[in-house]
């Protein structure tokens, strides 16, 4: 099934599932029609909301696509720490004239219900973030013809993915925008991670699974680099965030190349879990004090982020972005896939002798075996 997974899309280009309204059906459809693999993000949506987006996407394209699920999170947060952070955010609530959210309004993201919907209405690919599904879940997806893909940020996590029976592992480097897909949030690590090229090479040698490389990739030459390191495909998020089909807020898109936002940083300020975003006022003021408490902090800050966006204040928004954000291009998503493919082909000419780049034939086997 592993090689068949990468056979689903002609180009080794996967559009990352970006939760929060970014990965909308029109984006996934445009990517799929151009030869990549588009993804919907079910995170933070209801099961019915996910189902309606799947129906909409199927009305836009017959190409294969994927749906991403968040794994349920263990109860590890310190309620007193969350309370202290809520007190600290009281000034933000007053400034934006809104109430803080309820930190206890749910921690499983409707996982079981969403999974049931996907088993009743199978999609080509389901990916998982923040943990590993059980072997039973993976087997149930296989029985309905769905490929299972799981994110990992370390070799140990990749080995756990392999044991689950999944069809591929997404090796997410520290350069990636948005939430790190760590299986367990360890406050002692401070969100530190391994760079993408090193991670891909290590994972490639550790597991017998195709590797999808994710983290800071913005150009076709970088796709060539991760393929050369042993990946079967590349997953891009920030690159597609700036496209016209993306559902990202206009201020978020503009911020990617706005000289006011010069760097990214891993922070717990908005969600309680390490996530890479553009450094703005909110991140600077609250990041150092945010507790390791996901999804409690996510729920707590949700009204603030929504109010900041409504007020047109990018300094109060969660501006998720990878380290390559300044290389974002304002192109239609389909055109971006075409440009990336052309850049990849050009890189293949330069790297003559590296099989699989010319015409993109054979890329599907790049991560199979050791």
Image: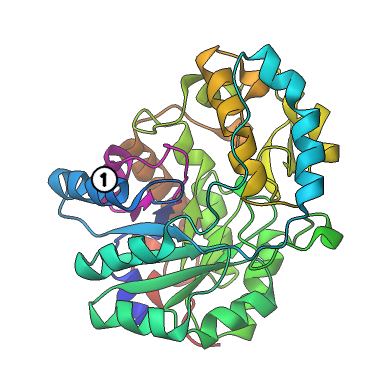
In the depicted view, which residue is nearer to us: 184 or 47?
47
Q: Percent x, y for residue 370?
A: 56, 87
- 161 vs 75: above or below: below
What residue is rendered at 27% in x and 49% in y?
Answer: 48
Asked if residue 208 shows in the view, the reply is no
In the depicted view, which residue is nearer to us: 324 or 187?
187
Taking 325 as reference, is 329 left or right? Answer: left
Secondary element at tag 1 = helix
Q: Quadrant of residue 29?
A: top left
What residue is rendered at 81% in x and 46% in y?
Answer: 81
Q: State how many labels appear.
A: 1
Q: Percent x, y for residue 219?
A: 52, 45
Residue 321 magenta-highlighted: no
Which residue, given by chain and number where applicable, does mark 1 sit on?
53
- 28 vs 187: above or below: above
What residue is rendered at 47% in x and 65% in y?
Answer: 128
Query: What range of the chain is rendered magenta?
Result: 16-41
Q: Percent x, y for residue 144?
A: 23, 77
Q: Percent x, y for residue 354?
A: 50, 70
Asked if residue 86 shows in the view, the reply is yes
Taking 340 as reference, is 268 left or right? Answer: right
State the scheme by which the image is colored.
rainbow
Mark 1 crowd level (few <14, some 14–19, many ≥20, 10 Å Cα): some
In the depicted view, which residue is nearer to us: 192 or 343?
192
Which quarter of the figure is the N terminus placed in? Answer: bottom left
In the depicted view, which residue is nearer to us: 136 or 322?
136
Residue 33 magenta-highlighted: yes
Q: Quadrant of residue 297?
A: top right
């Amino acid at each position: 099934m592993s090689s068949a997974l990468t056979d689903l899309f002609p180009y080794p280009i996967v559009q990352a599932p970006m939760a929060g309204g970014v990965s909308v059906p029109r984006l996934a459809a445009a990517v799929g029609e151009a030869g990549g693999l588009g993804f919907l993000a079910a995170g933070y949506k209801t099961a019915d909301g996910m189902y309606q987006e799947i129906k909409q996407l199927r009305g836009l394209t017959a190409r294969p696509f994927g749906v991403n699920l968040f794994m349920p999170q263990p109860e590890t947060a310190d309620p007193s720490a969350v309370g202290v952070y809520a007190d600290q955010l009281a000034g933000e609530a007053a400034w934006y004239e809104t109430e803080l959210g309820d930190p206890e309004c749910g921690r499983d993201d409707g996982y079981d219900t969403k999974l049931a919907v996907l088993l009743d209405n199978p999609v080509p690919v389901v990916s998982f973030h923040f943990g590993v599904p059980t072997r039973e879940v993976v087997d149930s997806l296989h029985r309905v013809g769905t490929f299972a893909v799981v994110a990992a940020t370390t070799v140990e996590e990749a080995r756990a993915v392999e044991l689950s029976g999944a069809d591929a592992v997404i090796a997410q480097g520290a350069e990636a925008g948005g939430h790190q897909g760590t299986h367990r949030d360890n406050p002692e690590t401070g969100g530190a991670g391994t760079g993408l090229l090193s991670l891909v090479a290590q994972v490639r040698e550790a597991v017998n699974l195709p590797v999808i490389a994710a983290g800071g990739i913005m150009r076709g030459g970088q796709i060539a680099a991760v393929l050369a390191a042993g990946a079967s495909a590349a997953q891009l998020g920030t690159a597609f965030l700036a496209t016209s089909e993306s559902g990202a807020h206009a201020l978020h898109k503009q911020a990617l190349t706005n000289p006011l936002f010069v760097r990214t940083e891993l922070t717990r300020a908005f969600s309680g879990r390490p996530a890479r975003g553009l450094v703005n006022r909110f991140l600077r003021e609250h990041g150092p004090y945010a507790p390791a408490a996901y999804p409690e902090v996510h729920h707590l800050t949700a009204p603030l982020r929504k109010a900041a966006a409504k007020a047109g204040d990018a300094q109060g928004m969660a501006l998720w972005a990878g380290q390559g954000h300044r290389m974002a291009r304002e192109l239609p998503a389909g055109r971006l896939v075409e440009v990336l493919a052309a850049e990849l082909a050009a890189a293949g000419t330069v790297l003559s002798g590296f099989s699989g780049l010319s015409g993109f034939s054979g890329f599907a086997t790049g991560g199979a075996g050791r």
